[in-house]
Image (tube, rainbow, N blue to C red):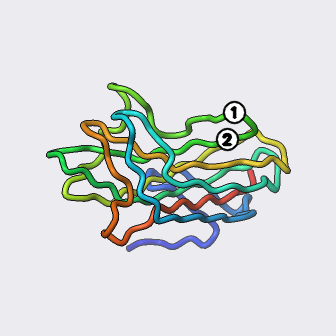
């Protein structure tokens, strides 16, 4: 039997990201139907982004993203990642470029649905403008994200959670 706890949110690995001492301060969402084709393999590129202004200092941010990946080559693998931008500084949060990175995730032929979540423990001040990016990469070949005709969208949701 499963237990539903109204005062707690956990990641799939059991990490508690919201309990009775924290609260969701804001939730932002963005989607697009743009087709994005990776220009290189094993390099994460932006698929969709969302911008918010932090409500409190040192908040946690729960991110979740979705996209549909497609490649016409056999056995292409791909994955999603996240980055955050504050001012001119961009920090990769999830998704490692290169031969020993993590873009080897899930097969993208004949098409695959990709989901990923991540928790970012920030040290930014209240009133800071942040742009969160959902990234996509292919390991074996270039991948098309949100291939036309499949009816999917690229989506990112970010929740600011008080520490």
> In the picture, residue 93 is in which quadrant?
top right
Q: How far apart are the alpha carbons under marks 2 and 1?
A: 6 Å
Q: Residue furthest top?
A: 99
Q: Residue furthest left?
A: 74
Q: Position of residue 35 (x, y in %)?
A: 41, 57
Q: Position of residue 107 (x, y in %)?
A: 23, 49
| In the image: residue 41, left or right of residue 159 | left
Are the residues at dot 2 and dot 1 in contact (C-beta closer than 8 Å)?
yes
For the residue pair 56 and 86, the one nearer the viewer reads as 86
Give the SS element for disc 2. strand
For disc 1, the neighbor class at 10 Å (few under 14, some 14 to 19, many from 20) is few
Give the SS element for disc 1. strand
For disc 2, the neighbor class at 10 Å (few under 14, some 14 to 19, many from 20) is some
Q: Residue at x 54, y 59 (%)?
A: 156
| In the image: residue 89, left or right of residue 43 | right
Q: Say which mark, if any, is on residue 89.
A: 1
> In the picture, residue 31 is in which quadrant?
bottom right
For the residue pair 62 and 87, the one nearer the viewer reads as 87
Q: Position of residue 36 (x, y in %)?
A: 42, 52
Q: In what quadrant of the picture does the N terminus appear?
A: bottom left
Q: Position of residue 91 (x, y in %)?
A: 61, 35
For the residue pair 64 and 147, the one nearer the viewer reads as 147
Q: Say which mark, if any, is on residue 85.
A: 2
Q: Residue at x 67, y 65 (%)?
A: 27
Q: Residue at x 19, y 51 (%)?
A: 72
Compared to 120, does 2 lie above or below?
below
Q: Say which mark, if any, is on residue 116.
A: none
> In the picture, residue 2 is in which quadrant?
bottom left
Compared to 103, does 30 lie above or below?
below
For the residue pair 162 and 157, the one nearer the viewer reads as 157
Q: Residue at x 73, y 56 (%)?
A: 52
């Amino acid at each position: 039997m499963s237990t539903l706890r109204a005062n707690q949110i956990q990641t799939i690995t059991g990490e508690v990201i919201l309990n009775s001492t924290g609260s969701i301060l804001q939730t932002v969402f963005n989607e697009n139907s743009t087709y994005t084709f990776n220009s290189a393999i094993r390099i994460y590129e932006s698929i969709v982004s969302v911008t918010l202004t932090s409500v409190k200092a040192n908040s946690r941010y729960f991110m979740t993203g979705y996209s549909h990946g497609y490649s016409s080559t056999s056995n292409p693998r791909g994955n999603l990642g996240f980055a955050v931008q504050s001012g001119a500084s961009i920090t990769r949060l999830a998704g490692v470029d290169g031969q020993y990175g993590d873009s080897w995730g899930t097969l993208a032929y004949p098409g695959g649905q990709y989901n990923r979540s991540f928790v970012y423990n920030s040290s930014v001040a209240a009133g800071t403008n942040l742009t969160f990016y959902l990234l996509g990469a292919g390991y074996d070949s270039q991948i098309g994200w949100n291939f036309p005709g499949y009816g999917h969208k690229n989506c990112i949701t970010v929740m600011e959670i008080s520490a």
